[in-house]
Amino acid sequence: MKLRKISLICAMGLTLAGSSLLPVFGMTANGPENGGNGGSSYSEEYGGENTSGIGMEVTYGYDGNAKADRYVPVNFSLKSQSASPFSGTVRVEAMESDYDIYQYDYPITLDAMGSAEKSLDIPVGRADILYVKLLDSQGTELIRKRLKMNVPTDVAELYAGILSDEPEKLSYMEGVGVNYSAVKIRTFPMQAEKLPDHVIGLDLLDVLVITDYDTRKLSKDQISAIMEWVKDGGTLLLGTGARADDTLYAFRSDLLNEDYEVPAEKSVDMGVEYATNGPGDSFMNLVCADISLKGGTGVLSNDQFPVLTAAVRGKGVVGVAAYDFVDIAPFCETQRSYVDKMFTALLGETRLNNLSSYLYSGNSSQFWSVQNMLNTGDVDKLPGLALYSIVILTYIVLVGPGTYLILKRKDKRRYYRTAIVSVSLLFTVVVYFMGAKTRFRDTFFTYATIFDNSESFEDEYTYINMRTPYNRAYSILLDPSYSLLPITRSKSYERAPVPKFTGSEDYNVRISYGEDGTRVSAQNAAAFSPKYYALKKRTSNENQKGLWAKITLFNGNVFGTVTNEYPFSVEKVGILMYGKMVVIDELKPGETKQLDGISVINYPINNSFQVSARVTGGYQYSKADIEDPDYMLALSRTNILSFYLDRYSSFYNQEARIVAFSEDQKDNQFLVNGGYETYGVTMYTSAINVNLKKDDETYRSALMRMPTTVSGQYYSDTNAIYGVDPVALEYSLGNDVSVEKLIFENPSEEFLDSQSTNYTNIFKGKMYFYNHDTGNYDLMDPGKTEYSARELVSYLSPGNTLTVKYVCEDSVENNWYVTLPMLMVLGRDK
């Protein structure tokens, strides 16, 4: 009997000990294989006694990988074992780059014994840790999960999504160093059924590779999201080969100029550097498709044809290869540097450098750009300095000798103190009522809105600065149709210690998503401290609103028409064609304007503020005058256009961009409720195709393909050089034309005024052409800007390239940044 009792007690002890190691429902064990000390990408914590019978599982990022200052996909599933329905909130907590705590609340309901799955896109500043919590209807925390993400900290990573029927055959891309190993490729297989159908869901990717895949499987929304993502800065890389029809099906109308011939097998030279035993070693027999990409230029060429063609779309780029990336797998598995060569050619040095710097600076560059754009306000809020000066001087005179002398004359000096108090109270009331017009009484907004219209969609980009005049919490309800992204600056440059993030901190900003609106609540913020947000919305352009044009640009002249299809007048209309622009004062509703004979202005592509001021009229003001409403309006318009050009239109693009402004402002379209003070500016823009051909001739910029730097330092995105040392560039003029004339065009004189603080420092010095007959550089006439085909015989290579050496004058100031002339090509089509 005694032995039986001892055995029973031991059994109970073992049971209790074992149960203490088991996870409570809704939790997982915190062992090495489940996120404990074993180095897993996440762990979980229990926030209290969970009596709700609700379990929650969470996945995030791509295999637990994420990047700072991006939208991170967070997927959670809930399962109820309760006989009662459940209503509560899923809360995601993140620390932003400025160390503020942001909470994102999403309502959730569950039926009795029910389940739910949801995917959220969370804007994350410091992406290393997230907390996901389940709260009941009373706000009581039921479950807490701590997510520890894999975030690159040492080497910048390029996230490449792979959409292919055989993604394992593209494993040769994984881990390849690009741009001298400054960026490392990380690949993530994608599936059509899980591919996001909204642009934010793709934000974590840098490149999307689609090859050996039937894009008919993609929905219309998924295709639209991909193209919108490209316009916002993504890179789409398409492989073709034998399955060109399948891969290009979804993008044919957007990307291709014309139908292509049936893909055929060709001998492709992968590069002489891969010929180990002889010239033939570098050749592969591959099925290739000859694709004509709209606005495309060859960035990687074979001897006879380009094997990789690229075209800029907005801030992003689309690349189409002649072959299928699966077919080159055997070669790339042994010659992985070819992947580096391919990605470097497609992305370019500027984009790769931006990826490298993003590791350290995050989204700070956007913060400073948005701050500068919104750094204006309503001039009506400025006090009248003259009136205030008169009142203050009058007060000083009365409080000082004035009151005393008046009372002394009336022999009532005993009332002096009472009189001083009365005068002070009187002037306090006067100043109070004088400031009624300039005083902020509630939360107020400064905004900048860009409407970007295409034939199918209207994309709205709104940037807001939200402030309050009081040191107290406030809450605003925004239109729920907008996506919302906080814009914060990194504090890493301040070398401030990173505060510990435990998930129990009080929030600085809470964003609650509901059917009636998106509520933004802020607390612990000083009066007038700015909070910046980016809002974005896409709607169908059913009425074909926009600015449309049919334009031909040839030999420095523009022909065609532009039409305003908005129901209101637009003014300060600019047609920007990468280095050339046309400015129109006004277009009335439905008006069509003929462009033949209108003046064409050459502008520097590296000075967006100066170009913007020329369009908006800001260049007409020699000095700042904040009391002039017209000057402030021109400055606001200049700031938003400069921001747009820097962010969305800074690379070569064959498309033209029309921009315009209107006095019909939409001041509070992003707010659910009115009554708030708003001040801002709205810009309208559309992209249009430009015809560069006339008869059998083509006129285009030689910068359509990035020049190769032979020596010195060249900034390809701004067409500028570090002029302290000589710089030699090899221009590719294209194998599709026979060059008839080359023109070196400088910006128009109005951009060269050295009295302006934003003037352009153009190249002044000696220019040499490389002579292929002698092997030497020949000095060119400094006053000559045009060269005929006969004059270029010795200088054009068999591949139609021209090598130019620029040597700046010693007397030129600011030689560290010199703008080169724009090289234009006039040639006859082959």
Image (cartoon, helix red, strand yellow):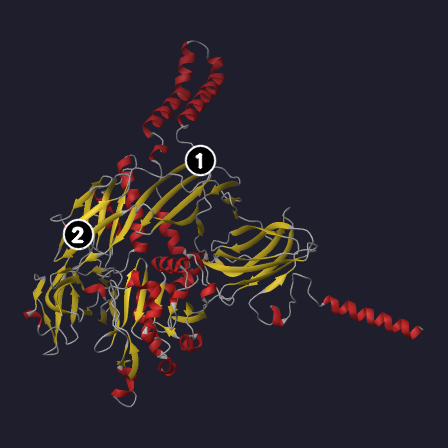
Residue 353 visible at all: no
- Kind of element beneath mark 2: loop
Horizontal relation, residue 773 to residue 336: left or right: left
Outermost residue to the left: 790
Badge 1 element: loop
Q: Residue 450 in the image: state x and y as whole percent.
A: 33, 47
In the image, residue 371 lies at what x, y percent? 38, 48
In the picture, the quarter occupied by the N terminus is bottom right
At 7% from the left and 62% from the top, the residue drawn is: 784
Kind of residue at badge 2: Leu
**Looking at the image, which is closer to me, 742 or 81?**
81
Observer able to see residue 535: yes
Task: Determine whether 279 is above or below 670 in the image.
Answer: below
- Tag on residue 674? 1
Q: Nearer the viewer, residue 445 or 258?
A: 258
Label 1 sits on what residue type? Gly
The tag on residue 352 is: none
Q: Is residue 755 above or below residue 589?
A: below
- Residue 777 figure quarter: bottom left
Q: Position of residue 633 (x, y in %)?
A: 29, 39
- How would you rate the neighbour count of disc 2 (Cα within 10 Å): few for under 14, some for 14-19, many for 20 or more? some
Quadrant in which the C terminus is drawn: bottom left
Few, some or many residues within 10 Å of mark 1 (<14, 14–19, 20+): few
The mark lying in front, picked from 1 and 2, is 1
